[in-house]
Image (cartoon, rainbow, N blue to C red):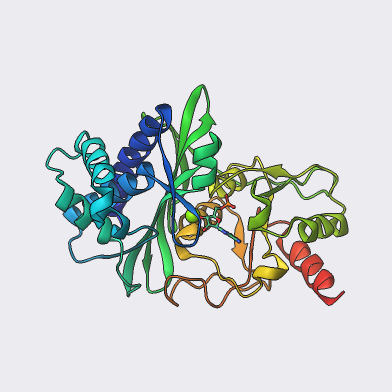
Amino acid sequence: MPHLKEQQVAIAAVTAAARLCQQIRQGSFQAFAKADQSPVTLADLGSQAIVCQTLSAAFADDSIVAEEDAQMLRQPSNRGILEQITERVRQTVPQTTPDLLTEWIDRGKGQTAARYWTLDPIDGTKGFIRGDQYAIALALIEYGQVQLGVLACPALPFQEHIGTLFVAVSGQGTTMMTFNGTSQPVQVSQRGGSDSVRLIESVESAHSDRPRQEEIARKLGLSCTPMRMDSQAKYGAVAKGDADLYLRIPLPQDSSRRENIWDHAAGAIIVEEAGGRVTDLDGQPLKFSCGAKLAQNRGIVASNGLIHEQVLGAIAACDQV
Ligand code: AMP
Ligand code: MG
């Protein structure tokens, strides 16, 4: 089966990282501001160390493009934080030392290549801090096509368990599992009627243009109140049919901002392999071969497929106003 080893290694890496994140969240933890003022925690850095170490041990030549780096941890004034993370990660990877930890985190500073991995060690850090949804998102890209996506949503319920792992392999569908291994295939919804279609969007109002999204929902005649969720867990919600449409329209002041590849690669294949469709606002496929940003795409539309053309039409009509 193609990509079987990649799938097994990615599941092991992301599951171990998800356990670390949940353990850290159960205690008290600090958040630090990065240069762009976005937050980062011990869990983001520990998660990246675990995933990069696991991938590097199995696929030494593969490039990894990940969100975080170890620059902050290398500053002598942050030695205490470095030691805290080392101690945490050592519970999963016994040979961890401060030097190895920073080396593993910086394995994520790779470039996009013919074959590369992209990782968001905690997508939705604001949700993680608030006690809401967050995700660990890992994808493998070959020749610009996402081949594998593994998305851990440690706070998303599945049956009587808390914690859901979505796994999608190109041409093989999407599976949803608990962290203990119970699994089932997932399919997007078949909802098409405007009175039943459910829109999902970010919790953070600064991350997308809610008034515009509301306008599009109105144009489509949607009557349900939008669901709100942090992180790529939104793609999971569309893949399992809890929501039918995920809109991410940039705010006017962010119109030149482009999305990070690690914020969408895993989520996109998880929706597509569950039978849905993912494009930008202009109906173009997401292009994962232009570096760390989706430089050629504007915004995101992820849907159950059935309603996709109608949604693109409503977006185009609103754009012309
Ligand atoms: P979500 O919870 O879906 O809003 O996604 C969290 C992601 O939003 C983070 O990984 C950030 O990369 C991204 N983000 C941060 N600022 C913005 C912004 N101004 N517009 C769009 N996305 C953003
Ligand atoms: Mg993110």
Find the residue positioned furthest to the left. Answer: 95
Q: Quadrant of the C terminus?
A: bottom right
Is residue 67 visible in this depiction of the protein? yes
Residue drawn at x 55%, y 37% as measured from the top left: 130
Residue drawn at x 80%, y 73% as measured from the top left: 319
Is residue 167 visible in this depiction of the protein? no
Q: What is the quadrant of residue 18 in the picture?
A: top left
Depth check: give the residue in front, 213 or 316. 213
Residue drawn at x 33%, y 45% as measured from the top left: 47
Residue 141 location in percent, x, y?
A: 38, 66
Relative side of 64 to 165, left or right? left
Relative side of 67 to 64, left or right? right
Q: Quadrant of the N terminus?
A: bottom left
Depth check: give the residue in front, 74 or 113. 74
Residue drawn at x 43%, y 64% as measured from the top left: 146
Residue 305 location in percent, x, y?
A: 66, 57
Q: What is the quadrant of residue 308 in the picture?
A: bottom right
The number of numbered badges drawn on the structure is 0
Image height of 120 relative to 319, above or below: above
Residue 283 location in percent, x, y?
A: 66, 71
Depth check: give the residue in front, 20 or 242. 20
Depth check: give the residue in front, 194 or 30. 30
